[in-house]
C-alpha cells in the first residue's frame, strides 16, 4: 500500500471565526495576555532595535562586537514582536546557514522521502491547535509544519523526527518562512552558536537525562527544603520538567512568556531553561512544600497565573547563577557513567498530548 503524503490530502474546512489574541491564538475565557508596552514606548523600542540591527540585519554583528552588554540587556527586556523573526535568525546563526546552503531546503522537501512522514502527519494537529495558522486540517500552516519537520528528518536521519520537535518548528513558523524556520531548527540542533540540542531528540533522550539530572541537583542545592519534600514524595524532574527542555517551554506555557524565554534562549543558550525552572519552583516554594504527591504533580504541571508573568518570573530567573555549577555537574555526569535519575524518563509523549 502506497504511503500517503500530506500533499495527497485536501485541506479541511476553515474553522469558524472566533476572537483571537494579539498572537493569533483563539481567546479562551480569562485568557488575556498583557499587551505589554504602551504604543509610544513600543515604537521607541522598535526604532532603537532597527538602528541596532541595520537594514536586514546588516549592522548586527558589528553592534554585538561593540556593545555586547547593551544587546544582552535589550534582549532580556524582550525583542519587539515585529522584529522577532529577523533577530532570532541573526542571534542563532541560522541566517548564515541559509546563505551557505542555497537550494538545499527545496531539495529536501520536494525530492527526498522520509521514514517519519506518517508520524509527522499524525502529530501535526497536536501542535498549537488553538492558533489560527495551524487550525485548518491540512491547511497552509499544517503543510508548512509538515514540510519543515519532514525536511529535517531527511537532513539528519540519525535524529529523524521526535514529537516535541513540532513545537519548536511551529513556534518558528509563526515568525518566519519555512526555509528560515528549517535552518533555525538546524542551527539549534546542530549547535551553530550554543551547545547542540540534538541529544534531546536522539534515541533514549540522552541530553534530557543529563539536563534533568543537573536540574535535580541544582534544585536540591538551592532549595533544600523543597528537595527533601520532593524526595519524600518520590517526585523527580522527569515527572514535570522533561517538556521544559524538549520544547523550551513552548508546549504548555503562556505564549507571551514562552516568547520572552526564547529571546534569551537563542542568545544565551540552555542555561535560561534551568534558570526559569528554578525561578518557578522558588516562586511557588512555600505552597509546594505543603502538598502531597498527587497535588504536587498537578501543581508542577499547572503553575498559577501570577507565576507566569514574564516581568515577575524572568527578573527572578536572571539573578540565579548556574553556569559554573552546570559545567561541574556535566563533567560529574559524564565521569560517573551518566548517573540516572531515580526513575527513567517515561511518559514525555503523554505529557505533550
Image (cartoon, grey):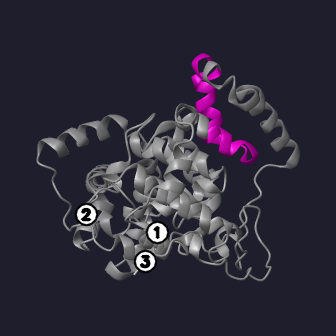
* Quadrant where the N terminus is found in the figure: bottom left
The quadrant where residue 329 appears: top left
Say which residue label 3 marks. Answer: 2
Q: Which of marks 3 and 1 is nearer the N terminus?
A: 3
Q: How crowded is mark 3: few (under 14 residues within 10 Å), some or many (20 or more)?
A: few
For the residues labelled 2 and 1, say whether their Cβ atoms are less than 8 Å apart.
Answer: no
> What are the residue bounds of the magenta stretch?
63-88
Alpha-carbon span between mark 3 and mark 1: 16 Å
3 to the left or right of 74: left
Say which residue label 2 marks. Answer: 228
Q: Of circles 3 and 2, which is in front?
A: 3
**For residue 81: magenta?**
yes
Q: How crowded is mark 1: few (under 14 residues within 10 Å), some or many (20 or more)?
A: many
Q: Residues within 10 Å of mark 2 (few under 14, many from 20)?
A: some
Q: What element carries label 1?
A: helix
Q: Of circles 2 and 1, which is in front?
A: 1
Residue 120 is marked as 1
Alpha-carbon span between mark 3 and mark 2: 55 Å
> In the image, what residue occupies the spot 62% across and 33% down?
73
Amino acid at each position: 500500500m502506497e504511503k500517503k503524503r500530506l500533499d495527497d490530502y485536501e485541506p479541511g474546512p476553515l474553522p469558524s471565526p472566533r476572537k483571537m489574541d494579539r498572537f493569533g491564538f483563539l481567546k479562551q475565557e480569562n485568557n488575556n495576555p498583557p499587551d505589554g508596552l504602551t504604543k509610544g514606548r513600543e515604537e521607541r523600542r522598535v526604532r532603537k532595535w532597527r538602528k541596532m540591527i541595520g537594514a536586514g540585519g546588516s549592522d548586527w554583528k558589528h553592534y554585538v562586537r561593540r556593545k555586547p552588554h547593551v544587546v544582552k540587556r535589550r534582549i532580556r527586556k524582550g525583542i519587539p514582536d515585529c522584529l522577532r523573526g529577523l533577530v532570532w535568525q541573526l542571534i542563532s546563526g541560522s541566517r548564515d546557514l541559509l546563505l551557505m546552503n542555497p537550494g538545499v531546503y527545496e531539495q529536501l522537501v520536494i525530492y527526498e522521502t522520509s521514514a517519519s512522514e506518517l508520524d509527522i502527519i499524525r502529530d501535526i494537529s497536536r501542535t498549537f491547535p488553538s492558533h489560527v495558522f495551524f487550525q485548518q486540517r491540512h491547511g497552509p500552516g499544517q503543510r508548512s509544519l509538515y514540510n519543515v519537520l519532514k525536511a529535517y528528518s531527511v537532513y539528519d536521519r540519525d535524529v529523524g523526527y521526535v514529537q516535541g520537535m513540532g513545537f519548536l518548528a511551529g513556534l518558528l513558523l509563526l515568525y518566519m518562512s519555512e526555509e528560515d524556520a528549517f535552518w533555525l531548527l538546524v542551527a539549534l540542533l546542530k549547535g551553530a552558536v550554543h551547545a547542540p540540542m540534538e541529544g534531546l531528540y536522539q534515541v533514549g533522550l540522552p541530553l534530557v537525562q543529563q539536563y534533568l539530572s543537573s536540574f535535580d541537583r541544582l534544585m536540591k542545592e538551592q532549595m533544600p527544603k523543597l528537595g527533601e519534600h520532593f524526595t519524600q514524595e518520590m517526585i523527580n524532574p522527569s515527572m514535570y520538567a522533561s517538556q521544559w527542555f524538549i520544547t523550551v517551554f513552548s508546549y504548555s506555557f503562556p505564549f507571551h512568556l514562552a516568547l520572552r524565554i526564547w529571546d534569551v534562549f537563542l542568545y544565551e543558550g540552555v542555561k535560561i531553561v534551568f534558570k526559569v525552572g528554578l525561578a518557578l519552583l522558588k516562586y511557588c516554594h512555600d505552597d509546594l512544600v505543603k502538598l502531597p504527591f498527587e497535588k504536587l504533580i498537578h501543581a508542577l504541571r499547572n503553575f498559577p497565573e501570577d507565576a507566569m508573568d514574564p516581568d515577575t518570573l524572568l527578573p527572578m530567573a536572571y539573578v540565579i547563577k548556574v553556569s559554573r555549577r552546570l559545567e561541574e555537574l556535566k563533567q560529574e555526569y559524564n565521569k560517573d557513567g551518566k548517573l540516572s535519575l531515580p526513575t527513567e524518563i517515561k511518559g514525555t509523549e503523554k505529557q505533550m498530548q
